[in-house]
Amino acid sequence: MDIFEFEGKTTEEAIENACRQLNLKKDDVDIEIIEPGSAGIFGLVGGRKAKIKVSTTKEVNEIPDQINGLAVAKEALENILALIPVEGITVQAEQIDGTIALNIEGDTSGLLIGRKGRTLDALQFIVNKIVNKTLEKRVQVVVDSENYRERRRDSLIEMALGMGDRAKKTRKPVATNILNPHDRRIVHLTLRDDKELDTRSRGEGILKKVLIIPKR
């Protein structure tokens, strides 16, 4: 018999999370309520998540480590967001090619994205630290909101191509603004197959510039 623990804002949500992540129907599992959860004062202060224990004799298609990783990552991000005054937001979690993808829905103000995605990057950094320490192994967690990551990727590709053209026309190196490792990688990959250009990272620490250099 396999046993798992799941959480949610309510007992019903915890059960829904369990059935969705285990890919089982409610009738296929036995549920024990560990913590019924509470909304707290005015639904804002002192609230506690509902926690359940789920056991099943049915075959579970997903790997338990992946299920636990999803639950840990989702809970970590939700706990952080509970400290930020943004109403009506929810977190969706899924496993994509070995990466845990967390999507914050409802942040129409862009507060959780921040300037050039730096708030989002900070949330992602903290959640990765929590998940890797909890699971005692390296797991990649990507935090997104309002499809920002894809929009940012498209913008970086357009920027890299434009700066590459300028470097070839002027025959002089051009440099991007400081970028995080993920954004720098997009620039490098965009120009990797251009035989007239070379790219190098320049700077100290996590944030560096990408130097786009025309080949002689």
Image (cartoon, helix red, strand yellow):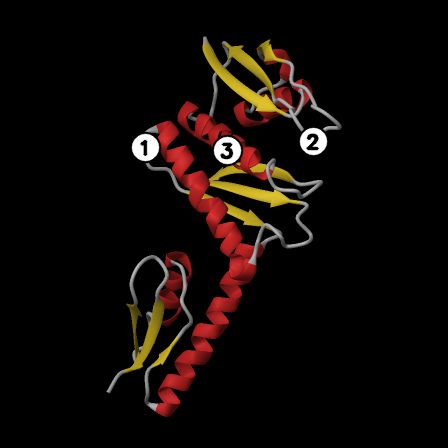
Separation of marks 3 and 2 at Cα, in angstroms: 18 Å
* Badge number at residue 91: none
Which of label 3 and label 2 is nearer to you?
Answer: 2
Q: Amino acid at mark 1?
A: Lys
Camera-nearest label, 3 or 1: 3
Q: Residue furthest right?
A: 42
Task: Tell me the residue that label 3 is attached to.
Answer: 76
Mark sitting earlier along the chain (3/1): 3
Residue 97, quarter of the rendered image: top left
Inspect the image, locate mark 3, and give the three-letter code of the amino acid beneath it. Ala
Q: Look at the numbered disc 1 and give the secondary structure of its residue.
A: loop
Residue drawn 63% across and 54% down? Answer: 110
Residue at horizontal 26 percent and vertical 83 percent from the top: 215
In front here: 48 or 128? 48
Q: Which residue is mark 1?
A: 137
Near mark 2 (Cα within 10 A), the count class, few <14, some 14-19 or many ≥20, is few
Q: Earlier in the sequence, mark 3 or mark 2?
A: 2
Q: Position of residue 15 (x, y in %)?
A: 63, 19
Please state, as top left, top right, bottom left or bottom right, where the C terminus lies in the image: bottom left
User: Along the horizontal axis of the image, is 103 left or right of 167?
Assistant: right
Instruction: Kindly check if marks 3 and 2 are in contact, taking CB atoms under 8 A apart as contact.
Output: no
Reply above or below: 176 against 115. Answer: below
> Can residue 35 be seen from the camera position used here?
yes
The correct choice, above or below, for 28 with respect to 211 in the image is: above
Q: Which image quarter: residue 131?
A: top left
Q: Residues within 10 Å of mark 1 (few under 14, many from 20)?
A: few
The residue at which mark 2 appears reads as 44
In the rendered structure, which amino acid carries the disc numbered 2?
Answer: Leu
What's the CA distance linking mark 3 and mark 1?
A: 16 Å
Rendered location of residue 106, percent (x, y): 68, 45
